[in-house]
Amino acid sequence: MATETKVLTAHVPLGLAEKVEAMASRLERSRGWVMKQALAAWVDQEEERHRMTLEALEDVDAGRVIDHQAITAWADSLGTDKPLPSPVK
């Protein structure tokens, strides 16, 4: 069964287009293949970022947070002779 596709058009800076063409040539693939790989990776990354944001907001709503001053004091102590224990539990 053939996969349905849709043509998407985007204007990209000349330098980026040249890099895509060079990469396609080096990999012996089409420009379209390189663009599909790049777009799929970006979409996956953005979906993961969104998932992690929602997870973090759930932590905030549940009160699972660490005080900013505690983190700052810990970070400032790392370059000293007596670093504080990590406030992360």
Image (cartoon, grey):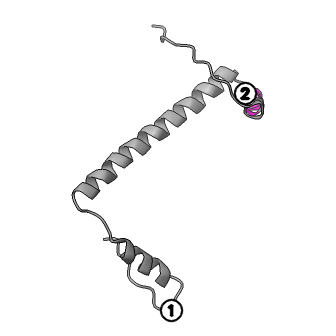
Q: Please, what secondary structure does the residue beneath circle 1 have? A: loop
The x and y percentages for residue 69 are: 38, 76
> Which residue ends up furthest to the top in the rendered image?
1
Earlier sequence position, callout 2 versus callout 1: 2
Q: Residue at x 38, y 71 (%)?
A: 68
Amino acid type, callout 1: Asp
> Which residue ends up furthest to the left in the rendered image?
62
Q: Please, what secondary structure does the residue beneath circle 2 have? A: helix
Q: CA distance from mark 2 to mark 1?
A: 53 Å
- The crowd level at tag 2 (other Cα within 10 Å; few <14, some 14-19, many 20+) is some
Q: Which mark is residue 68?
A: none
Amino acid type, callout 2: Ala
- Quadrant where the N terminus is found in the figure: top left
Residue range in magenta is 19-26
* As drawn, 60 above or below 83: above
Q: Residue at x 30, y 71 (%)?
A: 89
Give the residue pinned by disc 1.
81
Left or right of 33? Residue 73 is left
Left or right of 10? Residue 76 is left
Left or right of 47? Residue 12 is right
Dot in front, 2 or 1: 1
* As drawn, 2 above or below 44: above
> Which residue ends up furthest to the bottom in the rendered image?
81
- The crowd level at tag 1 (other Cα within 10 Å; few <14, some 14-19, many 20+) is few
Q: Residue at x 57, y 14 (%)?
A: 7
Q: Is residue 24 magenta?
A: yes
In terms of secondary structure, what is the magenta stretch mainly? helix
Give the residue pinned by disc 2.
24
Q: Residue at x 72, y 30 (%)?
A: 20
